[in-house]
Image: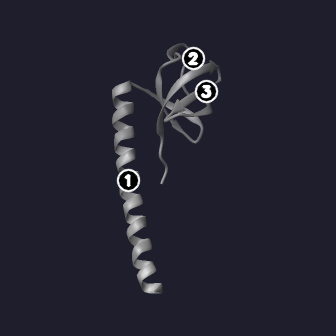
Amino acid sequence: MCVGVPMQIVEIHYPSGVAEAKGVKREIGLQLLPEDQIRIGDHVIVHVGFAIEKVDKQLADEIWEALDEVLRVMDEEDEGARSINSHRDG
């Protein structure tokens, strides 16, 4: 599964820059977006290291809420599987 994640641009050195999400900073490629349409503070969707789309903050927040929920459910499923396996092994 391929997932693009929302990040906020914190530095621009076109055609690259630095973006941050959840306290993690990454160097990203900006060349897929027009240079004159991106600014520090903008939110973008980052996929395989490249900003592929500019989005507003509200949409970025909504995407993170959904991603956090998916991760929470996956963690619960992993815990359940480990519990079942430990009972089988014991």
Does residue 42 appear to the left or right of 68 in the view shown? right
Q: Residue furthest front?
A: 90
Q: Secondary structure at mark 1?
A: helix
Say which residue appears at 54% left-offset and 30% top-offset: 20
Residue at (48, 41) in percent of width and height: 4
Q: Nearer the viewer, residue 21 or 45?
A: 21
Q: Secondary structure at mark 2?
A: helix
Closer to us: 25 or 27: 25
Q: Earlier in the sequence, mark 2 or mark 1?
A: 2
Disc ID at residue 18? 3
Q: CA distance from mark 1 to mark 3?
A: 27 Å
* Disc 2 to disc 3: CB gap under 8 Å: no
Label tally:
3
**Label 2 is placed on what type of residue?**
Glu
Q: Amino acid at mark 1?
A: Arg
Above or below for 1 versus 12: below
Q: Position of residue 33 (x, y in %)?
A: 54, 24
Q: Which of these two is toward me, 73 or 45? A: 73
Q: Nearer the viewer, mark 1 or mark 3?
A: 1
> Furthest residue to the top?
36
Q: Does any portion of residue 31 appear in the rendered image?
A: no
Query: Residue 53 placed where, x, y %?
Result: 47, 30
Indicate the colouring scheme.
Answer: one colour
In the rendered image, which residue does mark 2 sit on? Answer: 35
Q: Is residue 87 above or below residue 42?
A: below
Earlier along the polypeptide chain: callout 1 or callout 3?
Answer: 3
Specify few, some or many for label 3: CA neighbours under 10 Å numbering under 14, 14-19, or 20 or more.
Answer: some
